[in-house]
Image (cartoon, rainbow, N blue to C red):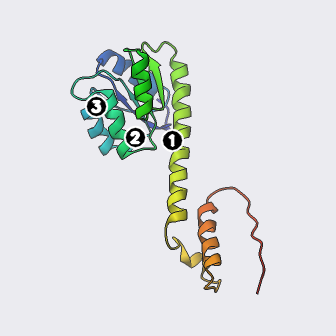
């Protein structure tokens, strides 16, 4: 296993051999793996860990994959869920995507490098979703997070205070900005 962890993946699979096989391959690829054999245990793991992506089977005892997808969407809408199922019916695939799964693969997964590529894309998408949500919260939130950064600028103008809020949001990015306007 590499020294740096790419991301944490929750594998939810009732077939122990497949769960261990996925775990071994993905750990060798640099991922941190958490696993569970059903949806109920997966939710417990999810609530106790910082999970970046979920790989889930559909047909499992105690709590199935479709219910798990619905529950995860409710508590963590930005975390991608990839379904890996042997059921292979079109209805299952459509229903899992309708409930919020990011993608659907049919067992057996023969090309593990394709799975790894899919995970990388899901991680990228999940990261973008989290960033968008953070920016929305910042833009819609009230007040400045770092008012001391603007302490030397004296203003009561709502327009300027709004600009300060935008500046805080974009400051961590590498995007250049130009502020123009009339001076008084």
* Residue at image coords 28%, 21%: 14
SS of the residue under disc 2: loop
* Residue at image coords 29%, 34%: 42
Where does the image place residue 108, in percent across and percent down from the top left?
Answer: 43, 12
SS of the residue under disc 3: helix
Where does the image place residue 60, in percent across and percent down from the top left?
Answer: 27, 22
Residue under circle 2? 51
The answer to whether residue 29 is above or below residue 131 is: above
Q: Is residue 85 left or right of residue 138?
A: left
Q: Nearer the viewer, residue 158 or 112?
A: 158
Q: In this view, does 72 lie to the left or right of 110?
A: left
Residue under circle 1? 126
Where does the image place residue 118, in percent across and percent down from the top left?
Answer: 53, 27
Q: From the image, which quarter does the C terminus lie in?
A: bottom right
User: If you read the primary sequence from the N terminus, does the residue marked by circle 1 or circle 3 appear first?
Assistant: 3
Residue under circle 3? 39
User: If you read the primary sequence from the N terminus, does the residue marked by circle 2 or circle 1 appear first?
Assistant: 2
Asked if marks 1 and 3 touch (Cβ < 8 Å), the reply is no
The answer to whether residue 59 is above or below residue 127 is: above
The circle on residue 172 is none
The answer to whether residue 126 is above or below residue 25 is: below
SS of the residue under disc 1: helix
């Amino acid at each position: 296993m590499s020294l740096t962890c790419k991301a944490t993946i929750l594998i939810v699979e009732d077939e122990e051999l497949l769960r261990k096989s996925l775990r071994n391959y993905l750990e060798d690829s640099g991922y941190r793996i958490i696993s569970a054999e059903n949806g109920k245990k997966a939710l417990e793991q999810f609530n106790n860990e910082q999970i970046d992506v979920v790989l889930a089977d559909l047909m499992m005892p105690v709590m199935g994959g479709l219910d798990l997808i619905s529950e995860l969407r409710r508590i963590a809408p930005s975390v991608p869920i990839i379904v890996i199922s042997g059921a292979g019916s079109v209805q299952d695939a459509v229903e899992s995507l309708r409930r919020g799964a990011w993608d659907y693969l049919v067992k057996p997964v023969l090309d593990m490098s394709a799975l790894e590529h899919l995970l990388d894309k899901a991680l990228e998408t999940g990261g973008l979703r989290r960033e968008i949500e953070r920016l929305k919260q910042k833009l819609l939130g009230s007040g400045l997070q770092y008012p001391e950064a603007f302490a030397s600028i004296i203003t009561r103008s709502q327009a300027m205070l709004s600009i300060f809020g935008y500046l805080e949001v974009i400051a961590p990015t590498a995007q250049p900005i130009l502020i123009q306007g009339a001076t008084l």
